[in-house]
Image (cartoon, grey):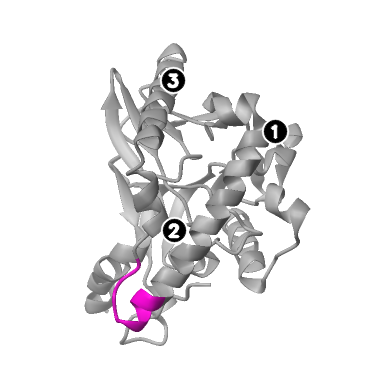
Amino acid sequence: MNSTPALPGSEQEDDYVLRFRSIWISDIHLGTRGCQAERLLDFLRHTESDYLYLVGDIVDGWHLRRRWYWPQAHNDVVQKILRRARHGTKVFYVPGNHDEGARPFCGLHFGGVYVVNEIVHETAAGLRMLILHGDQFDAVVGYAKWLAHLGDKAYDVALYVNRIYNMIRRRLGMPYWSLSAYLKHKVKNAVAYIGLFETYIAEHAARENADAVLCGHIHHAEMRQIGNVLYLTDGDWVESCTALVEDFDGKLSIIRWAEERESLLTPLLAKA
């Protein structure tokens, strides 16, 4: 598990909080060794928002059915999210394919967390954003699940190598870098597949009269225009440790927490 060192200068660093109107996170994969729960906890401690969207694959049911793995940090993530809901944050949970067991509960809420199949969010700037996990547009997951599970196991191997690689980088004083994400986006077939996936998602959003669409599923944070639709993904908390955020003017941006944490928090500490 990757731990995140505290910034120097204050024992009450949790008091320094980045405030947003909305935050989107997905693909946490609680229940797996690849989940960077401690980095996510650090992000949640230092952010607040009126809206929090959990865009699928929050808990990895596929892995938990094969082997139980649930350290304290994973439980802490769940408790932190529930605490947000109790303190007034509007929390919406859009199940993905790895936590598809939650889909029968769409339309219900638990502890202030609303479970929905998809939802439209209107930004402060008036942008209508359709939010869904996106696996329904994945032909492999939708029509050849056995192949998806095979790929999932290969992905576990890549993540294991990635953890060892980053342990070495930390000891050398180098920042976190996702080897597995780099390799994935250098593979020609993967790049072609992602492009087709993005096109299908954008076309679906256009049919729903949305100005933008946000999805998870592919573990790669991005923001770009596809036709008349703004296409957004919020990345993951396995490889890239990224989130999408909206400020109070409606501006959307991607936060890469592993890389940008100090640059984002240091100005707050300097004002103290």
Which mark is drawn over residue 106? 1
- For the point 75% across and 36% down, which residue is it? 105
| Circle 2 SS class | strand
Amino acid of disc 1: Cys
Q: Earlier in the sequence, mark 3 or mark 1?
A: 1
Q: Which residue is disc 2 drawn over?
A: 48
Between residues 12 and 178, which one lies in front from this camera angle?
178
Q: Earlier in the sequence, mark 2 or mark 1?
A: 2
Between residues 118 and 91, which one lies in front from this camera angle?
118
| Circle 1 SS class | loop
From the top left corner, tell me how far across and down residue 126 is, in percent: 34, 28
Q: Earlier in the sequence, mark 3 or mark 2?
A: 2
- For the point 67% across and 71% down, which residue is it? 71
Which mark is drawn over residue 200? 3
Measure the alpha-carbon separation of dots 2 and 1. Answer: 25 Å
Residue range of the region highlighted in magenta in the rendering: 168-176
Q: Is residue 28 visible?
A: no
